Image (cartoon, grey):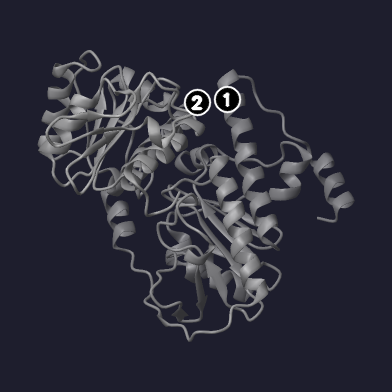
Amino acid sequence: MKKCMHPADRIVATMNRLYYNGMTTVSGGNLSIMDNEGNMWISPSGVDKGALTREDIMKITPDGQIIGRNRPSVEYPFHLSVLRKRPDFKAVLHAHPTPLVGFSLMRIVPDLTLMADTAKICGSVVFAKYAVPGSQKLGDLISAEFEKGYNTVMLENHGVVIGAPSMEEAFRMFEALDFTARVQIACATMGKKGKGLTEAELARYQDFKAPTYKALEPAAVTNQEIDLRNDMMKKSTRAYGLNLFSSVDGVWSARLADGSQVITPEGFDPLEGCGCDMVRVKGDAAEAGKTPSKYATFCAKVYEKYPEINSVIVARCPSAMAFAQTDAKFDARLIPESYIQLKDVPVLPFMSLLEDPDKALEQLNPKNPVGIIANDCVISMGTSVLAAYDHLEVLEYSARALVSCAAVGHPVTTMNDAQIQEICDVFNL
């Protein structure tokens, strides 16, 4: 998606993102945007959410005139009410992805302490009582919670409503909440309760200050850098489509021939950004006007210590993160590919990549290129962009297999020592 879009195009693009990521159904969910002229643009009722066009989006003028070839969403009264009562909002997102529907049925809010960014992104989350969709009563119940200052409202037996200054921000909040629900479900499937972060740990994360970089001297862009930026962009977009990244997190770095690195900026969204948004960092200097990811220092330490490592990924994949949130042990001796790609996967302390990268690299190395950081993230290193991606993908797919086994309830049989030794001998591990 592009950052500068007509409201109707933005609604279509966001609905596509929701639908094709399994976050809504053909008939479910509705989106609205208030433009600078006081017009509300809203998704239609009774139109396939997976095939919307710009012409399908409805416009409601400040004097109440409804313009367009369809009927506006039946929920449009509450959208209008929320946007009028909260002038700081320019967008409202309503959808019912299965994880959040499950929590709405249980009347509980996902644990916002499982990941350090979630509470900061979503703010406090509150429930609104049940009422018939499209009814004035439902609109009043939802609006009442937003009037209290909440930006995220879950609906009993329904879904979630998010209000934000932009549709991009509303989507990030929505995806962060949905992702937390997915991780919590994965933990529960394994019979575990996510341990969550303490207030002190959350404060520690929020107070962390990345180094300040001076402006990097402009230099001619090499073909290698162009290729790396394009490759990282393609792979990060693919990773997003496979639920390895989200719009909230996902950091990618690659080494250039001169020892510098190209890394995604803070808050990089694979579907909103492009290769030119990535930041070149060399020593204590970075491209002027850009903010590299806070993991840039860790990546620089990796490249300094291991000349054979040329790419690093930091991510939060839903199934793998279940092992970061609980005391469940991740064992890569599942199938030959899992062990070949992952070897022994260490679990490192919370924030270790940021606070003590040298100590973290005592356990992470070219032979053990993947690690799990408690209550934080997963890390994957590789000899190339593709190799780092491959390790990450195998980690998440292996974790999904283990979560599936837990759901069935039968014990897992891993490969034995003799089988592992045979793999090591054949593949020179």
The residue that disc 2 covers is 189
The number of discs equals 2
Q: Residue at x 31, y 19 (%)?
A: 158
Please give the residue where the numbered disc 1 appears in the rendered image. Answer: 406
Name the spot of residue 396 as percent of width and height, x first. 60, 41
> In front: 417, or 179?
179
Which quadrant of the structure image shows residue 42?
top left
Q: Give how far apart the Cα atoms at labels 2 and 1 are.
A: 6 Å
Viewer-closest of 45 and 275: 45
x, y percent for residue 129:
19, 19
Tag 2 near tag 1, CB within 8 Å? yes
Secondary structure category for the residue under label 1 = helix
Q: Amino acid at mark 1?
A: Ala
* Residue situated in front as seen by the camera: 18 or 349: 18
Give the left or right position of residue 28, taking residue 166 as reference.
right
Q: Position of residue 38 (x, y in %)?
A: 17, 43
Q: Residue at x 85, y 56 (%)?
A: 428
Q: Is residue 95 visible?
A: no
* Residue name at image x 52 percent, y 74 percent: 280
Q: Amino acid at mark 2?
A: Thr
Q: Quadrant of residue 23?
A: top left
Residue 171 vertical placement versus 312 (above, below): above
If you read the primary sequence from the N terminus, does the residue marked by circle 2 or circle 1 appear first? Answer: 2
